[in-house]
Image (cartoon, coloured by chain):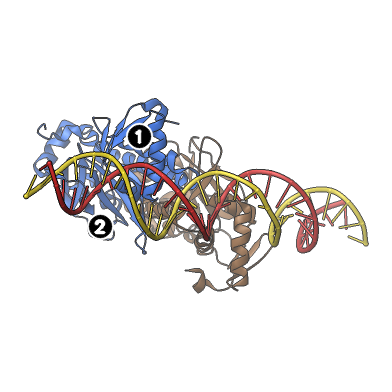
Chain colours: A brown, B blue, C red, D yellow
Amino acid sequence: MRVPNPKQNLLLAALSAAELKRLRPNLEAVTMPLGDVVYESGRHLDHVYFPTTCIVSLLYVLENGASAEIAVVGYEGVVGVSIFMGGETTPSRAVVQSAGSAFRLPGAMMKDEFTRGGAMQHLMLRYTQALITQMAQTAVCNRHHSIEQQLCRWLLLSIDRLPTNVLTMTQELIANMLGVRREGVTEAAGKLQDAGVISYRRGHIKVLDRERLEA
Amino acid sequence: MRVPNPKQNLLLAALSAAELKRLRPNLEAVTMPLGDVVYESGRHLDHVYFPTTCIVSLLYVLENGASAEIAVVGYEGVVGVSIFMGGETTPSRAVVQSAGSAFRLPGAMMKDEFTRGGAMQHLMLRYTQALITQMAQTAVCNRHHSIEQQLCRWLLLSIDRLPTNVLTMTQELIANMLGVRREGVTEAAGKLQDAGVISYRRGHIKVLDRERLEA
DNA sequence: GCACGTTCGTGCGCTTGCGCACCGAACCCA
DNA sequence: TGGGTTCGGTGCGCAAGCGCACGAACGTGC
């Protein structure tokens, strides 16, 4: 495991040297264990998180407890956009889907930097726009796609944010993310394995044929 | 029909007198006929639209032509957030769901005003945040709710943005918005009518019992 | 008042996914 | 090496929703 470097996060890496230098003292490297709840729905947000090697899922939780993933954030993004979007709280829950590390920045610092209106603001807005697009896609997938198609999409979203092609993730958890039954995931994963696209064993999924996953 | 007044839009109304005065010369009142496509997915955005008496639906369209509504915008919001979020284009289609009027502002003006960093920026970001929340809800509803529940939610979203409790909308169109079959809407609407919550006839839906719709 | 297009109702077979229950098998740890 | 626990596979019955097809009711325009 390398020493965490802020530049591993694409947003931080895109900042100018001066901006990064300004933020650096307040950037704190944190390790993100699997299953850790970064934000709880409706709670106050203290920090924004810039993932480097971890992946964070954004889940929207209903009153009755049912939930579904609305977006995935990895080294290309930031968790906690609500902080600079104006709300102190977020309506979604953020859960670590793949363990790793991240940098976090106190919310107040983030706001200050954002308000300066420089590259940081621009970057954050662009990323938020991308996040919106991802959410819109999720919404439509939930309606029109089969479990198998959604599983494919989800696998792609995940491995694109990891250095390896192996995910550490039980089918139960995937089912939770997608908001479907575990058995449905089992079935879909079985098909994909038969087709030679993926292979898995107890909590580890290896993507063999990325091309064919994109269909 | 009153003469359109920018203050009918909540976002414009929330601006200070000075700001509104600055924008006023560039604000153009436009009428929005039913079914009009305000934005096409992937196309360049010339203007942002501030609805006053119309309602605009944001649809995300898949490659195969299937689509689903991801958000509803009325007098409380603005259509075309991508313009100040950094992208020149939007991944979604915007369609007029209920005829009425709106004010539009050239994209460049919007950007300028946004970049000033004043109340406008703050307002736009807050609204975008609200839009994100609405989209997240839509995503989860698509997964967990029955057609009837979704119809209820959709009706509420719509009448909340209209002065009356009567919607002019065929079931076919509603089905399009929700991304379901027309027959499914017929069935759900039939149930609601039997329950005395709504009444409808050929393209006109009247909401009778708002309370019970919220379940 | 009549014809036509639009909108809504209904029926049927079929697929997908859910809920539940149970078992085998892999893994972890002592 | 041998528990016990966690995962994954499988088999029901059931409900929701889809696709298709057809017909009835409404309302508009001539």
Residue under label 2: B40
Q: What's under tag 2, amino acid-wise? A: Glu
Q: Nearer the viewer, residue B188 or A106?
A: B188
Q: Nearer the viewer, residue B98 or A59?
A: B98
Whole-angstrom CA distance, mark 2 to mark 1, is 26 Å
Q: Position of residue B48 (x, y in %)?
A: 21, 48
The tag on residue B156 is 1
Looking at the image, do the residues carrying marks 2 and 1 touch, with CB atoms under 8 Å apart?
no
Mark 1 belongs to chain: B
Q: Nearer the viewer, residue B22 or B164?
A: B164
Q: What's under tag 1, amino acid-wise? A: Leu
Q: Position of residue A111 (x, y in %)?
A: 38, 42
Q: Are marks 2 and 1 on the same chain?
A: yes
Regarding mark 2 in the picture, which secondary structure is present there?
A: loop
Q: Is residue A105 above or below residue B191?
A: below
Q: Dot 1, crowdedness within 10 Å: few (<14), some or many (≥20)?
A: some
Q: Is residue B57 visible?
A: yes
| A214 displayed left or right of B4 | right
Q: Nearer the viewer, residue A101 or A88?
A: A88
